[in-house]
């Protein structure tokens, strides 16, 4: 008679159920611990990098503040230097003006005298400037004929050359109609006459006296 053991599969199922409730093997625990350590290391690295960047930013801010403070200290010196340069330029301009007025003092007096002599009636001068070569005149007149007379009078003077009419514009003020004009007048510089050289008399031969 053949016997069949029917209890063996039941024992296998029981073993499988029992092994399912047992704790995990040691390899799985090691894997979990390594992952936690890596995460902690990454977290510590990020925190260190953050604090390092914050320290660098604070250092840069300190350097910028120090540079700004030095700039503010030097700003006063730069302002003083600019003030000295401006004063020097103004002083040089005044010195040059004094030299120019001194050198042109005689000719300026002569120019004003000639203008007073040559200006016709109903012609008014608004501005006159002299740069050492050209006399620039701005004025007003009641007609073009008066401007032409003024130009002719100036050219008849030995002090002035050929007059150049720059512009002549008609203006109206109320019921009065007049002309505004500007002239460029060359000024003849006076020639310095050198005194004639004195002729030295030739030495005469001495006459011998008879004994």
Image (cartoon, grey):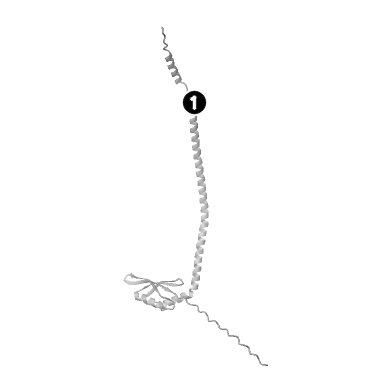
At horizontal 38% and vertical 74% (from top left) the residue drawn is: 124
Quadrant occupied by the C terminus: bottom right
Classify 75 as above or below 161: above
Indicate the position of residue 198 as horizontal and vertical percent values. Answer: 55, 83
Q: Which of these two is toward me, 45 or 202? A: 202
Q: Which residue is mark 1?
A: 27
Indicate the position of residue 120 as horizontal and vertical percent values. Answer: 38, 77
- Residue placed farthest to the right in the image? 211
User: Does residue 121 appear anywhere in the picture?
Assistant: no
Q: Give the total number of marks visible in the rendering.
A: 1
At horizontal 51% and vertical 61% (from top left) the residue drawn is: 85
Q: Which of these two is toward me, 113 or 157? A: 157
Q: Secondary structure at mark 1?
A: helix
Quadrant occupied by the N terminus: top left
Indicate the position of residue 71 as horizontal and vertical percent values. Answer: 51, 53
Q: Which of these two is toward me, 150 or 11? A: 11
Badge 1: few (under 14), some or many (20 or more) residues near its Cα, within 10 Å? Answer: few
């Amino acid at each position: 008679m053949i016997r069949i053991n029917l209890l063996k599969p039941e024992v296998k199922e029981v073993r499988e159920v029992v092994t399912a409730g047992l704790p995990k093997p040691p390899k799985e625990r090691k894997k979990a611990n390594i992952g936690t350590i890596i995460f902690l290391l990454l977290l510590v690295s990020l925190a260190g990098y953050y604090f390092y960047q914050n320290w660098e930013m604070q250092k840069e801010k300190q350097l910028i503040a120090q540079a700004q403070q030095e700039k503010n200290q030097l700003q006063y010196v730069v302002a003083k230097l600019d003030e000295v340069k401006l004063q020097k330029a103004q002083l040089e301009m005044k010195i040059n003006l004094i030299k120019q007025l001194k050198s042109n003092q005689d000719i300026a007096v002569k120019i004003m005298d000639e203008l007073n002599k040559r200006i016709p009636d109903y012609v008014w001068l608004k501005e006159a400037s002299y740069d050492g070569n050209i006399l620039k005149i701005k004025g007003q007149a009641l007609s073009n004929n008066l401007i032409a007379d003024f130009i002719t009078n100036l050219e008849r003077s030995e002090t002035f050359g050929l007059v150049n009419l720059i512009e002549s514009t008609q203006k109206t003020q109320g019921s009065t109609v007049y002309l505004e004009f500007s002239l460029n007048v060359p000024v003849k510089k006076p020639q310095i006459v050198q005194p004639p050289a004195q002729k030295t008399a030739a030495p005469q031969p001495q006459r011998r006296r008879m004994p």
